[in-house]
Image: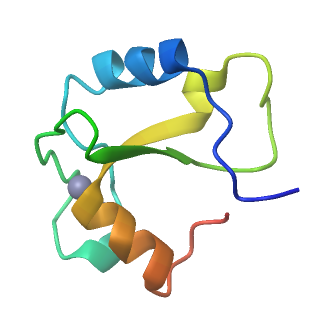
């Protein structure tokens, strides 16, 4: 019952791989059009949970987006429509 990111190192690696090392953020609040595609640097990105509801537990990686630090700070501080 927290915003705590519960994901394994393996899950994180899988997300990174799926994202091809680029930010998967598609939020309009960041200023980028479409997908961000900012290069993700190890240790400087966050797995961001898309939704608290859904198939969480089945495939942990499908419920997360790879988000660069720049987007992440916007997502956590800005007003947005994403759920936490
Ligand atoms: Zn980004
Ligand atoms: Zn963004």
Q: Tell which of 1 and 59 is nearer to you.
A: 1
Res. 1 image quadrant: bottom right
Res. 3 image quadrant: bottom right
Looking at the image, is 72 positioned above or below residue 66?
Answer: below
Which residue lies at the image location 53% right of the left edge and 18% below the top edge?
11
Res. 59 image quadrant: top right
Q: Quadrant of ligand 1?
A: bottom left
Q: Where is residue 38 in the image (x, y as percent from the top left)?
A: 12, 48
Which residue is the extreme one toward the left? 39
Q: In the displayed structure, does residue 77 sit left or right of residue 70? A: right
Q: Where is residue 21 in the image (x, y as percent from the top left)?
A: 19, 28
Q: In the displayed structure, does residue 77 sit left or right of residue 42? A: right
Looking at the image, is 70 positioned above or below residue 60?
Answer: below
Looking at the image, is 77 positioned above or below residue 65?
Answer: below
Which residue lies at the image location 11% right of the left edge and 41% below the top edge?
39
Q: How many labels does the image show?
A: 0
Q: Which image quarter is the C terminus in?
A: bottom right
């Amino acid at each position: 019952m927290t915003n705590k990111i519960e994901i394994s190192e393996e899950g994180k690696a899988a997300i990174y791989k799926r994202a091809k090392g680029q930010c998967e953020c598609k939020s309009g609040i960041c200023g980028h059009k479409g997908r961000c595609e900012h290069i993700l640097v190890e240790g400087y990105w966050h797995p961001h949970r898309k939704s608290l509801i859904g198939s969480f537990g089945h495939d942990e990686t499908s419920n997360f987006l790879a988000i660069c630090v720049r987007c992440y700070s916007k997502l956590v501080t800005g007003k947005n429509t994403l759920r936490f």
